[in-house]
Amino acid sequence: MPDPAGALVLGHGAGGGVKSPDLTAAARVARSAGFSVVLVEQPYRVAGRRSPAPASQLDAAWLTVIASLRERELRDVPLVVGGRSLGARVACRTAAGAVAVAVLCLAFPLHPPGKADDPSKSRLAELDAVRLPVLVVQGEKDPFGMPPPGANRSVVTVPGNHSLRSTAAIEAAVAEWLRTVIAGRS
């Protein structure tokens, strides 16, 4: 895309690929807003494995892809990183290293199902560590929990659970947020 408004790079969840309804909805709305979009399949999925690699390997693979994109297609373009579930966690952990301007989290897994009362299982620190604008789009009945809003974090609740199949609600939330992220950079 010549002269894109920005770029959106999205990663998938632990058990799925880049064709999940929420990722395709976010990609669709970003493209219509003038963004270049890249959907990244993690190496463990490309290799046919179902279980994710350790976080350090996921993060390293993600940053390698981002660096490659930054050298070519996404040079000098404001970069928004994100993903669904596990992909959202990777994006949060690597946002600074990716030199992103914002993070999009679809179905962020705040804690494992049934572990809300165990502070050692919380992943809120990954969200709190991000100093950039963050949008979390979360199903109202997500068994992985509901992240709270924060200083730079907006949380939009949509119908559904962790699957996030309400694509119209996702598209509306992402479209509005992308406009504010890019407008905020002008």
Image (tube, helix red, strand yellow):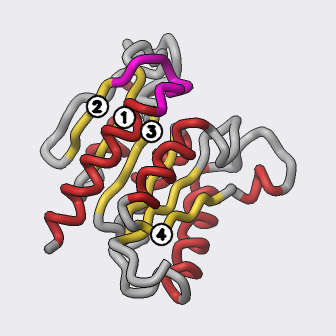
Residue at coordinates 49% horizontally, 77% vertically from top-left? 1
Residue drawn at 41 percent across, 66 percent down: 35
Write down the residue under mark 3. Answer: 106
- Closest to the observer: 146 or 20? 20
Considering the whole magenta stretch, tell me its main secondary structure: loop
Give above or below for 66 relative to 129.
below
Residue at the disc numbered 2: 156
First-in-chain label (1 vs 2): 1
Residue 114 location, x and y as percent?
50, 11
**Structural distance between the alpha carbons of marks 1 and 2:** 5 Å
| Residue at the (36%, 24%) spot, across then down | 158
Residue at mark 3 to residue at mark 1: CA–CA distance: 5 Å
* Pointers 3 and 1 in contact (C-beta within 8 Å): yes
Q: Secondary structure at mark 3?
A: strand
Give the CA distance from mark 4 to mark 2.
23 Å
Q: CA distance from mark 2 to mark 3?
A: 10 Å
Pointers 1 and 2 in contact (CB under 8 A)? yes
Q: Secondary structure at mark 4?
A: strand
From the top left corner, tell me how far across and down residue 33 is, in percent.
36, 60
Is 146 contained in the magenta span? no
Dot label at residue 137:
1
Label 1: which secondary element: strand
The amino acid pointed to by label 3 is Leu
Q: Quadrant of residue 155?
A: top left
Q: Secondary structure at mark 2?
A: strand
Per the model, the C-alpha gap separating discs 4 and 1 is 21 Å
The earlier-in-sequence mark between 4 and 1 is 4
Q: Which residue is mark 4?
A: 36
Please name whichever residue, 53 or 72, is drawn nearer the observer in this view of the structure.
72
